[in-house]
Protein backbone atom coordinates (compact mmCIF):
# COMPACT_ATOMS: atom_id res chain seq x y z
CA UNK A 1 0.00 0.00 0.00
CA UNK A 2 1.16 3.52 -0.85
CA UNK A 3 -0.11 6.37 1.33
CA UNK A 4 0.46 9.94 0.18
CA UNK A 5 -0.49 13.25 1.80
CA UNK A 6 -2.15 15.59 -0.71
CA UNK A 7 -1.69 19.32 -0.11
CA UNK A 8 -4.78 21.31 -1.13
CA UNK A 9 -3.43 24.64 0.09
CA UNK A 10 -4.43 26.72 3.09
CA UNK A 11 -7.33 28.94 4.12
CA UNK A 12 -8.33 31.11 7.06
CA UNK A 13 -11.06 30.70 9.65
CA UNK A 14 -11.99 32.70 12.72
CA UNK A 15 -9.90 31.58 15.68
CA UNK A 16 -12.77 31.87 18.14
CA UNK A 17 -14.96 29.68 15.96
CA UNK A 18 -12.21 27.09 15.72
CA UNK A 19 -11.65 26.88 19.48
CA UNK A 20 -15.16 27.38 20.87
CA UNK A 21 -15.22 28.14 24.59
CA UNK A 22 -11.43 28.17 24.97
CA UNK A 23 -10.31 31.81 25.56
CA UNK A 24 -8.22 33.57 22.95
CA UNK A 25 -5.59 34.28 25.62
CA UNK A 26 -4.90 30.53 25.56
CA UNK A 27 -5.34 29.46 21.93
CA UNK A 28 -3.61 32.51 20.48
CA UNK A 29 -0.35 31.26 22.00
CA UNK A 30 -0.76 28.04 20.04
CA UNK A 31 -1.75 29.46 16.68
CA UNK A 32 -1.60 33.28 16.54
CA UNK A 33 -4.46 35.10 14.85
CA UNK A 34 -4.06 37.98 12.42
CA UNK A 35 -5.60 41.44 12.92
CA UNK A 36 -9.01 40.09 11.82
CA UNK A 37 -8.88 37.25 14.36
CA UNK A 38 -8.29 34.74 11.56
CA UNK A 39 -5.96 31.75 11.83
CA UNK A 40 -4.42 29.87 8.93
CA UNK A 41 -5.30 26.20 8.45
CA UNK A 42 -4.37 23.63 5.87
CA UNK A 43 -6.56 21.32 3.80
CA UNK A 44 -4.82 17.95 3.64
CA UNK A 45 -6.27 15.01 1.76
CA UNK A 46 -4.96 11.46 1.81
CA UNK A 47 -4.34 9.19 -1.17
CA UNK A 48 -4.34 5.41 -0.70
CA UNK A 49 -3.04 3.18 -3.49
CA UNK A 50 -3.39 -0.58 -3.09
CA UNK A 51 -4.56 -3.58 -5.06
CA UNK A 52 -6.66 -2.11 -7.88
CA UNK A 53 -7.76 0.97 -5.92
CA UNK A 54 -6.67 4.60 -5.88
CA UNK A 55 -8.67 6.09 -3.00
CA UNK A 56 -8.79 9.82 -2.23
CA UNK A 57 -10.08 10.99 1.16
CA UNK A 58 -11.57 14.52 1.02
CA UNK A 59 -10.98 17.15 -1.65
CA UNK A 60 -10.46 20.60 -0.08
CA UNK A 61 -12.11 23.84 -1.21
CA UNK A 62 -11.82 23.38 -4.95
CA UNK A 63 -11.65 26.41 -7.25
CA UNK A 64 -15.14 26.85 -8.71
CA UNK A 65 -16.59 29.34 -6.20
CA UNK A 66 -16.68 33.07 -6.97
CA UNK A 67 -14.37 35.80 -5.71
CA UNK A 68 -16.84 36.91 -3.04
CA UNK A 69 -16.87 33.43 -1.52
CA UNK A 70 -13.10 33.11 -1.49
CA UNK A 71 -12.73 36.61 -0.05
CA UNK A 72 -14.15 35.29 3.23
CA UNK A 73 -11.64 32.44 3.51
CA UNK A 74 -8.40 33.82 2.02
CA UNK A 75 -7.12 30.72 0.22
CA UNK A 76 -3.32 30.77 0.07
CA UNK A 77 -0.31 28.52 -0.35
CA UNK A 78 1.01 26.77 -3.41
CA UNK A 79 -0.76 23.43 -2.98
CA UNK A 80 -3.74 22.49 -5.14
CA UNK A 81 -5.65 19.23 -5.30
CA UNK A 82 -4.88 18.40 -8.92
CA UNK A 83 -1.35 19.78 -8.74
CA UNK A 84 -0.54 17.67 -5.70
CA UNK A 85 -2.02 14.58 -7.35
CA UNK A 86 0.17 15.14 -10.41
CA UNK A 87 3.19 15.64 -8.17
CA UNK A 88 2.42 12.26 -6.60
CA UNK A 89 2.26 10.68 -10.07
CA UNK A 90 -1.51 10.44 -10.52
CA UNK A 91 -4.26 12.18 -12.47
CA UNK A 92 -7.93 12.71 -11.77
CA UNK A 93 -8.74 9.83 -14.11
CA UNK A 94 -6.67 7.41 -12.02
CA UNK A 95 -8.80 7.86 -8.89
CA UNK A 96 -11.20 4.96 -8.38
CA UNK A 97 -12.90 6.07 -5.16
CA UNK A 98 -13.41 9.36 -3.30
CA UNK A 99 -14.38 9.12 0.36
CA UNK A 100 -15.95 12.36 1.58
CA UNK A 101 -15.81 12.61 5.35
CA UNK A 102 -18.61 15.19 5.24
CA UNK A 103 -20.02 17.85 2.93
CA UNK A 104 -18.74 21.06 4.54
CA UNK A 105 -17.26 23.11 1.71
CA UNK A 106 -13.61 22.80 2.80
CA UNK A 107 -13.84 19.01 2.56
CA UNK A 108 -15.97 18.51 -0.54
CA UNK A 109 -15.38 21.58 -2.74
CA UNK A 110 -12.91 19.82 -5.02
CA UNK A 111 -15.23 16.86 -5.63
CA UNK A 112 -17.07 18.75 -8.39
CA UNK A 113 -15.46 20.79 -11.15
CA UNK A 114 -16.90 23.45 -13.42
CA UNK A 115 -16.13 23.21 -17.13
CA UNK A 116 -15.65 26.07 -19.60
CA UNK A 117 -19.41 26.15 -20.27
CA UNK A 118 -20.28 26.46 -16.58
CA UNK A 119 -21.50 22.87 -16.25
CA UNK A 120 -20.78 21.08 -12.96
CA UNK A 121 -19.38 17.56 -13.25
CA UNK A 122 -17.58 15.07 -11.01
CA UNK A 123 -13.94 16.12 -10.85
CA UNK A 124 -12.82 12.47 -10.90
CA UNK A 125 -14.52 10.96 -13.95
CA UNK A 126 -13.85 7.31 -13.21
CA UNK A 127 -14.45 7.38 -9.45
CA UNK A 128 -17.21 6.27 -7.15
CA UNK A 129 -17.90 8.83 -4.43
CA UNK A 130 -18.77 7.71 -0.90
CA UNK A 131 -20.80 9.16 1.97
CA UNK A 132 -23.76 7.88 4.01
CA UNK A 133 -27.37 8.41 3.03
CA UNK A 134 -27.98 10.06 6.40
CA UNK A 135 -25.29 12.62 5.77
CA UNK A 136 -26.48 13.36 2.22
CA UNK A 137 -30.02 13.99 3.45
CA UNK A 138 -28.69 16.13 6.33
CA UNK A 139 -26.65 18.28 3.95
CA UNK A 140 -29.41 18.52 1.33
CA UNK A 141 -31.87 19.82 3.95
CA UNK A 142 -29.49 21.91 6.07
CA UNK A 143 -30.23 23.44 9.42
CA UNK A 144 -29.72 27.19 9.84
CA UNK A 145 -26.44 26.64 11.69
CA UNK A 146 -24.79 24.71 8.86
CA UNK A 147 -26.54 26.16 5.81
CA UNK A 148 -23.54 28.30 4.80
CA UNK A 149 -21.26 25.25 4.93
CA UNK A 150 -23.41 22.93 2.81
CA UNK A 151 -23.28 24.25 -0.75
CA UNK A 152 -25.40 22.07 -3.02
CA UNK A 153 -23.17 22.66 -6.04
CA UNK A 154 -20.48 20.70 -4.20
CA UNK A 155 -22.41 17.45 -3.89
CA UNK A 156 -25.77 17.38 -5.70
CA UNK A 157 -24.04 17.03 -9.12
CA UNK A 158 -22.50 13.81 -7.84
CA UNK A 159 -25.90 12.29 -7.19
CA UNK A 160 -27.25 13.59 -10.48
CA UNK A 161 -24.34 11.95 -12.28
CA UNK A 162 -25.07 8.63 -10.59
CA UNK A 163 -21.63 8.34 -8.99
CA UNK A 164 -22.60 8.87 -5.34
CA UNK A 165 -22.69 5.73 -3.21
CA UNK A 166 -23.58 5.15 0.42
CA UNK A 167 -21.73 3.34 3.16
CA UNK A 168 -24.11 1.61 5.57
CA UNK A 169 -24.83 3.52 8.78
CA UNK A 170 -22.84 0.95 10.68
CA UNK A 171 -20.07 1.82 13.15
CA UNK A 172 -16.83 0.15 12.18
CA UNK A 173 -18.10 -0.92 8.74
CA UNK A 174 -15.34 -2.98 7.11
CA UNK A 175 -14.93 -1.91 3.49
CA UNK A 176 -11.99 -4.20 2.77
CA UNK A 177 -8.93 -5.66 4.49
CA UNK A 178 -7.33 -2.23 4.81
CA UNK A 179 -10.19 0.21 5.33
CA UNK A 180 -12.76 0.47 8.09
CA UNK A 181 -15.27 3.33 8.40
CA UNK A 182 -15.95 4.92 11.77
CA UNK A 183 -18.82 7.37 12.29
CA UNK A 184 -19.03 10.58 14.32
CA UNK A 185 -22.04 12.76 15.12
CA UNK A 186 -20.84 15.73 17.16
CA UNK A 187 -19.36 17.93 14.44
CA UNK A 188 -22.10 17.11 11.94
CA UNK A 189 -24.44 14.23 11.20
CA UNK A 190 -22.72 10.97 10.22
CA UNK A 191 -19.17 12.22 9.60
CA UNK A 192 -16.82 9.51 8.32
CA UNK A 193 -13.50 8.72 10.01
CA UNK A 194 -11.64 6.31 7.72
CA UNK A 195 -9.40 3.89 9.60
CA UNK A 196 -6.51 2.58 7.51
CA UNK A 197 -4.89 -0.66 8.64
CA UNK A 198 -1.51 -0.88 6.97
CA UNK A 199 -0.33 -3.97 8.78
CA UNK A 200 -0.64 -5.57 12.21
CA UNK A 201 1.47 -2.85 13.80
CA UNK A 202 0.40 0.35 12.04
CA UNK A 203 -3.10 1.85 11.86
CA UNK A 204 -3.77 5.43 10.76
CA UNK A 205 -7.11 7.17 11.33
CA UNK A 206 -8.06 10.14 9.20
CA UNK A 207 -9.36 12.37 11.99
CA UNK A 208 -11.35 14.83 9.82
CA UNK A 209 -13.06 17.46 12.01
CA UNK A 210 -13.26 15.38 15.17
CA UNK A 211 -9.59 16.24 15.77
CA UNK A 212 -8.85 18.89 13.11
CA UNK A 213 -5.42 19.79 14.51
CA UNK A 214 -2.99 18.84 17.25
CA UNK A 215 -4.30 21.89 19.13
CA UNK A 216 -7.72 20.19 19.43
CA UNK A 217 -6.64 17.11 21.39
CA UNK A 218 -7.58 18.67 24.74
CA UNK A 219 -11.14 17.65 25.58
CA UNK A 220 -12.41 21.22 25.98
CA UNK A 221 -11.03 22.25 22.59
CA UNK A 222 -14.20 21.83 20.54
CA UNK A 223 -15.01 23.94 17.51
CA UNK A 224 -17.85 26.41 17.60
CA UNK A 225 -18.98 24.87 14.31
CA UNK A 226 -19.95 21.57 15.98
CA UNK A 227 -23.69 21.02 16.04
CA UNK A 228 -23.59 18.81 19.15
CA UNK A 229 -20.60 19.87 21.26
CA UNK A 230 -21.43 17.58 24.17
CA UNK A 231 -21.58 14.65 21.75
CA UNK A 232 -18.18 15.72 20.41
CA UNK A 233 -16.88 15.76 23.98
CA UNK A 234 -18.08 12.20 24.59
CA UNK A 235 -16.78 11.02 21.22
CA UNK A 236 -13.36 12.59 21.76
CA UNK A 237 -13.05 11.12 25.24
CA UNK A 238 -13.72 7.57 24.07
CA UNK A 239 -11.90 7.90 20.76
CA UNK A 240 -8.67 9.39 22.11
CA UNK A 241 -8.53 6.86 24.95
CA UNK A 242 -8.75 4.07 22.37
CA UNK A 243 -6.13 5.71 20.14
CA UNK A 244 -3.74 6.01 23.09
CA UNK A 245 -4.38 2.46 24.24
CA UNK A 246 -3.92 0.86 20.82
CA UNK A 247 -1.09 3.07 19.60
CA UNK A 248 -2.93 4.37 16.54
CA UNK A 249 -1.70 7.32 14.50
CA UNK A 250 -4.01 10.23 13.72
CA UNK A 251 -3.70 11.95 10.35
CA UNK A 252 -4.63 15.63 10.74
CA UNK A 253 -6.54 17.40 7.98
CA UNK A 254 -6.23 21.03 9.09
CA UNK A 255 -2.97 21.37 11.04
CA UNK A 256 -0.47 23.38 8.96
CA UNK A 257 2.55 22.23 10.95
CA UNK A 258 1.79 18.62 11.86
CA UNK A 259 0.60 15.77 9.65
CA UNK A 260 0.32 12.99 12.22
CA UNK A 261 0.22 12.58 15.98
CA UNK A 262 0.09 9.86 18.59
CA UNK A 263 -1.82 10.23 21.86
CA UNK A 264 -0.93 9.58 25.50
CA UNK A 265 -3.05 9.84 28.63
CA UNK A 266 -1.84 11.79 31.65
CA UNK A 267 -2.08 10.60 35.27
CA UNK A 268 -5.72 11.71 35.38
CA UNK A 269 -6.58 9.92 32.14
CA UNK A 270 -6.72 13.10 30.06
CA UNK A 271 -5.49 12.90 26.44
CA UNK A 272 -2.46 14.83 25.24
CA UNK A 273 -0.25 14.81 22.18
CA UNK A 274 2.57 12.31 22.56
CA UNK A 275 4.47 12.50 19.25
CA UNK A 276 4.20 14.90 16.31
CA UNK A 277 5.27 13.16 13.13
CA UNK A 278 5.27 13.56 9.38
CA UNK A 279 3.46 10.88 7.40
CA UNK A 280 6.85 9.88 6.01
CA UNK A 281 8.11 9.24 9.54
CA UNK A 282 5.10 7.07 10.34
CA UNK A 283 5.52 5.03 7.18
CA UNK A 284 9.29 4.68 7.56
CA UNK A 285 8.72 2.37 10.50
CA UNK A 286 6.66 -0.15 8.54
Image (tube, rainbow, N blue to C red):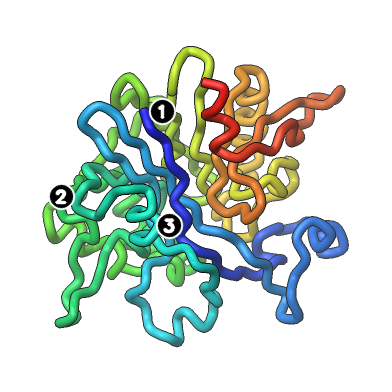
Q: Residues within 10 Å of mark 2 (few under 14, many from 20)?
A: some
Q: CA distance from mark 1 to mark 2?
A: 28 Å
For the question of whether residue 86 can be seen, the reply is yes
Q: 120 and 134: which one is in front?
A: 120
| Rendered residue at 50%/67% (across/down) | 78
Q: CA distance from mark 2 to mark 3?
A: 20 Å
Residue at image mark 2? 126
124 is higher (above) or lower (below) than 175: below
Left or right of 268: which side holds 116? Answer: left
247 is higher (above) or lower (below) than 72: above
SS class of the residue under badge 2? loop
| Rendered residue at 58%/25% (across/down) | 248
| Residue 142 occupies quadrant | bottom left
- Name the mark on residue 95: none
280 is higher (above) or lower (below) than 203: below
- Name the mark on residue 107: 3
N-terminal-most mark, 1 or 2: 2
N-terminal-most mark, 2 or 3: 3
Q: Position of residue 7 (x, y in %)?
A: 47, 56
SS class of the residue under badge 1? loop
Q: Residues within 10 Å of mark 3 (few under 14, many from 20)?
A: many
Q: 158 and 257: which one is in front?
A: 257
Left or right of 107: which side holds 202? Answer: right
Residue at image mark 1? 171
Quarter occupied by the N terminus: top left
Amino acid sequence: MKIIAIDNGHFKLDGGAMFGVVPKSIWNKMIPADDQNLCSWTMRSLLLVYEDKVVLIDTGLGDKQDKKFFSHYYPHGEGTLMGSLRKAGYTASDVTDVILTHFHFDHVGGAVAQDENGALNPAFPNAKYWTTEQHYNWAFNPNARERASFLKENFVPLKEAGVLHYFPEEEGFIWDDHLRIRLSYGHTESMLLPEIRINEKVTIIYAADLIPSAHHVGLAYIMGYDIRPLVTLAEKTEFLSEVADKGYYLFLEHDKDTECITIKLDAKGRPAVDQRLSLEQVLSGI
